[in-house]
Image: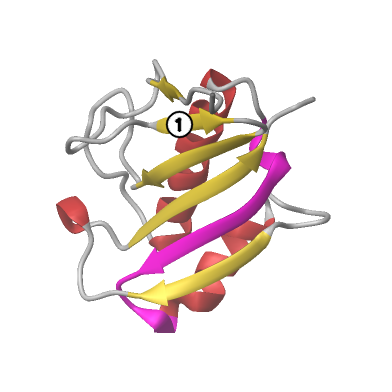
């Protein structure tokens, strides 16, 4: 019988904007849904440039990881979605502050638009502690 998956709701993270879970744990892996730069307290996009938005996405992912018993630093892969590829350097600068050593594998994908007018969205696949 396959190991059951565990669906997580991360209290303190912005609510899901659609019919999906904040994360699903299966085996030793936590699959985190994409986080947009919503302030959990207000439910609105954070003010500021794409660097500030990137930081908020990653802060939201930290909340989701904690709800699953993991740490964002244990991410094995992240996907970064941006509406403007010319912001790549700004995104990298903010992103690097969360992964100062041994960063996860990553893909950056240019997209036409993101929910709620966000400039960036980030998802993660994270190793759960043994």
Position in image of residue 7 (x %, y %): 40, 23
The residue at the point 57 percent across, 47 percent down is 125
> At 26% across and 57% down in the image, what residue appears?
118
From the viewer's perspective, is residue 69 above or below residue 29?
A: above
Give the image quarter of residue 100.
Answer: bottom right
- Residue 51 image position (x, y, % from top left): 48, 59
Magenta segment includes 80: yes
Q: Can you give x and y, in whole percent of width and height, for residue 3 in the image? A: 56, 25
- The magenta span reads 71-86
Query: 103 or 59, which is in the foreground?
Result: 103
Measured from the top left, where is residue 85 in percent x and y?
40, 81
Question: Crowding at label 1, few (<14), some or many (≥20) Cα neighbours within 10 Å?
Answer: some
Which of the 4 image quadrants contains residue 72? top right
Residue at 30 percent across and 72 percent down: it is: 83
Secondary structure beneath disc 1? strand
The residue pinned by badge 1 equals 24
- 82 or 97: nearer the eye? 82
The N terminus appears in which quarter of the rendering?
top right
Depicted 89 relative to depicted 78: above or below = below
Q: Count the marks.
A: 1
Of all residues, the one furthest to the front in this rendering is 1
Q: Residue at x 21, y 75 (%)?
A: 112
């Amino acid at each position: 019988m396959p190991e059951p998956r565990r669906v997580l709701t991360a209290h303190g993270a912005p609510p899901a904007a659609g019919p999906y879970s904040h994360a699903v744990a299966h085996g030793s892996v936590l699959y985190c849904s994409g986080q947009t730069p919503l302030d959990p307290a207000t439910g609105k996009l954070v003010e500021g440039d794409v660097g500030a938005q990137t930081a908020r996405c990653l802060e939201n992912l930290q909340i989701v990881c904690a709800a699953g018993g993991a740490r964002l630093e244990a991410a094995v892969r992240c996907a970064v979605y941006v509406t403007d590829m010319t912001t790549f350097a700004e995104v990298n600068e903010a992103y690097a502050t969360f992964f100062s050593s041994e960063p996860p594998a990553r893909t950056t994908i240019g997209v036409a638009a993101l929910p709620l007018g966000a400039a960036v969205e980030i998802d993660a696949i994270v190793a759960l502690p043994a």
